[in-house]
Image (cartoon, rainbow, N blue to C red):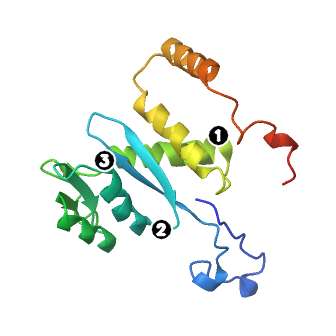
Amino acid sequence: FGGHIRPHNEKAKRVDRRKKEHQTGTRRVVIAMREREGRVLPFVGENEGEGVALANENVSRTATMSADEAGHWDALHMGWNVDRVNHSEIYSDHGKHTNLVESFFSRLRNMIQGQHHGVSPKYLHQYANHSAWLEDNRRTDNGTLARIVVSNAMEAPVSRNWKGYWQRAA
């Protein structure tokens, strides 16, 4: 998310935005771990490979993990039973899939593109956490969700991150 460089109007002056020298350095990725029939745990990092260290900190060694074919996930085999899915060949193979976390990513992308039209890297973790909460509670009725939000807001202390954010200089 983020780090978009607008292409130049004239085709002759356009650069290959995939190359590192033509990137802004503000692009971030959301790394998520999702329990089967459980919660989504999102993290924001500079690259997807940081997920291995996050798994070491947050996932029990008795868990079975699912991952795609990306090379940085090879390190997971040293500590866990890992089901791998090669998406260029198949999306689901007899119970091996990454559909649970992919549905979270789909909803997060739709939320950011549709409602917010873009997100600053500074606040991406809060948007990811909000999307995770919505994903975890997607089967809860609206009245109950409203009661949860209001009760949590009333019990929470004043947020130093959000209090007066519109008054700060950009």
Looking at the picture, how far across and down is residue 59, in whole percent?
28, 50
- Callout 1, which amino acid? Gln
Q: Secondary structure at mark 2?
A: loop
- Left or right, 20 with respect to 170, comes to left
| Residue nearest the viewer, comparing 153 with 74 | 153
Neighbor class of circle 2 (other Cα within 10 Å; few <14, some 14-19, many 20+) is few
- Callout 3, which amino acid? Asn
Q: Residues at badges 2 and 1 in contact (C-beta under 8 Å)? A: no
Q: Cα distance, mark 2 to mark 3?
A: 21 Å
Q: Residues at badges 2 and 3 in contact (C-beta under 8 Å)? A: no
Instruction: Return the mark for residue 115.
Output: 1
Q: Secondary structure at mark 3?
A: helix
- Left or right, 85 with respect to 57, comes to left
Q: Cα distance, mark 3 to mark 1?
A: 23 Å
The residue where tag 3 is placed is 99
Residue 48 picture quarter? bottom left
The residue where tag 2 is placed is 47
Residue pictured at 65% horizontal, 50% vertical: 123
Q: Secondary structure at mark 1?
A: helix
Q: Nearer the viewer, mark 2 or mark 3?
A: 2
Neighbor class of circle 1 (other Cα within 10 Å; few <14, some 14-19, many 20+) is few
State whether residue 94 is above or below residue 139.
below
Q: Residues at badges 3 and 1 in contact (C-beta under 8 Å)? A: no
Mark 2 or 3, nearer chain start: 2
- Quarter holding the N terminus is bottom right
Residue pictured at 64% horizontal, 40% vertical: 115
| Residue nearest the viewer, comparing 140 with 16 | 140
Q: Residue furthest left?
A: 94
